[in-house]
Image: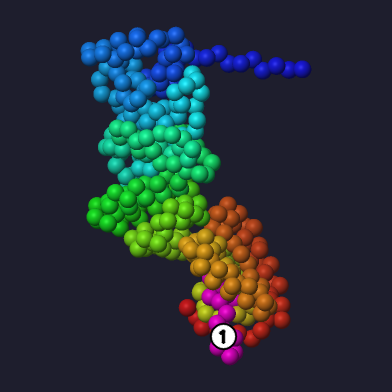
Amino acid sequence: MSYQIPSATPSLEELARRQQNVVTASQLRARGVPPRVVSGHCRSGGPWQRLLPRVYLLQEGLPTPEQRMWAALLYAEQNGREADRREGAVITGAAALALYGFSAVPRLPAVTGVEVLVPRQRRLRDVGEVRIRRTARELEAREVHGLACAPIARAVADALRDWTESGVLESGLLGPRLLRSVLGEAVTAPAGAERPVCRVGELITELREAGLVGMPRIRAALDELLASERQSVLSRLGELVDEWLLPVPLAAPELRMRGGTFVAVPDLYWPQVGVAVEVDSALRCVSEGEAAWVRTGQHRMEYLGVRVVYVTGTRVAAEPDAVGEELRQAFVAGGTDVVQLLVTEG
């Protein structure tokens, strides 16, 4: 039988180093620092200072932006009862985007409010610059500069929701160009920046959960982002068609039956063999209604004998040769008893 030796509790010095000199009352108590000493050290002219309820900075002077983030996170994590026992909390919104390094949001020193996401059942209140946002979903955390942050898609959605609720979007302070930049940086990191990004589908899901996709400004920026992403994938598909020596397909033709009944508008179509290519609908559909419309068209094509090849932008980027071979095989095989269709080029 094997035993796991419990790790030793870090000393106050080590803990302070990990948390950039920001600690909680319970952490101090667990390391033998009595409340009267804490109170004495936090008096005017003392070496420590109280940043938030039960959260202290073990130094003099103004806290750095990172120390302010640590204070907000520790305030939301602590339960104030047992030493070093915490419940989940992650930094989200504009503060998280600043930590991730988004160029479209104010730099970290200029961030004046810190949104912290916590489970719905937590009993916490806003205090100082800390704003508590609750969620019924399981928290996900990404470590950024040692701090727990919400995933990029969630952080973007929370930032946009905060700007919406505070009237920043309607006031015009966040113009269309800046809004497009925030969404664009979420899915594509700027050149030379080494940071995570999210998939377009994840971003749409979070914006939909936040009830933001119906806002005209956000929807317009999102549509522009989707169009740009789709065009990039379609351009790469065009290159694969050339590389695999396939005939040039029609781009976005309208397919109808001989009686005029609408069938679909595939992304690419080879009428001579009855083969269509559909790029992932996550780059095409924001609402469930739009997705249902696209799926219906795809089902109609398949029912009428058209061979439909489904590709995703992720796979085109990661496995171009496999996608090219799949297109070649589909072209060679062609459709099956394809009903004669009227084709109008897009």
Q: How is the image coloured?
A: rainbow
Residue at horizontal 61%, vertical 16%? 6
Residues shaded magenta: 256-270
* In front of the other: 143 or 131: 131
Which amino acid, by three-letter code, is at mark 1?
Answer: Thr
Residue furthest toward the bottom?
259
- For the image shown, how many numbered marks are present on the structure? 1
Q: Is residue 234 visible?
A: no
Q: Position of residue 201 (x, y in %)?
A: 51, 55
Task: Determine the image quadrant of residue 80.
Answer: top left
Q: Residue at x 35, y 9 (%)?
A: 37
* Residue at image point 31% right, 21% down: 50
Residue 326 visible, this angle: yes
On the image, the x and y values in percent for residue 98 come to 35, 39
283 relative to 339, above or below: above
**Quick one: quadrant of the N terminus?**
top right
Q: Which residue is mark 1?
A: 261
Q: Residue furthest right?
A: 1
- Closer to the camera in the image, 148 or 258: 148
Q: Quadrant of residue 35?
A: top left
Let me know if residue 127 is in the magenta part.
Answer: no
- Residue occupying image coordinates x 37% and y 46%: 159
Task: Judge whether 145 appears above or below 175 on screen.
Answer: above
From this view, report whether residue 143 is shown above or below residue 54. below
> With 3 as the anchor, is 252 left or right in this view?
left
Q: Nearer the viewer, residue 274 or 144?
A: 144
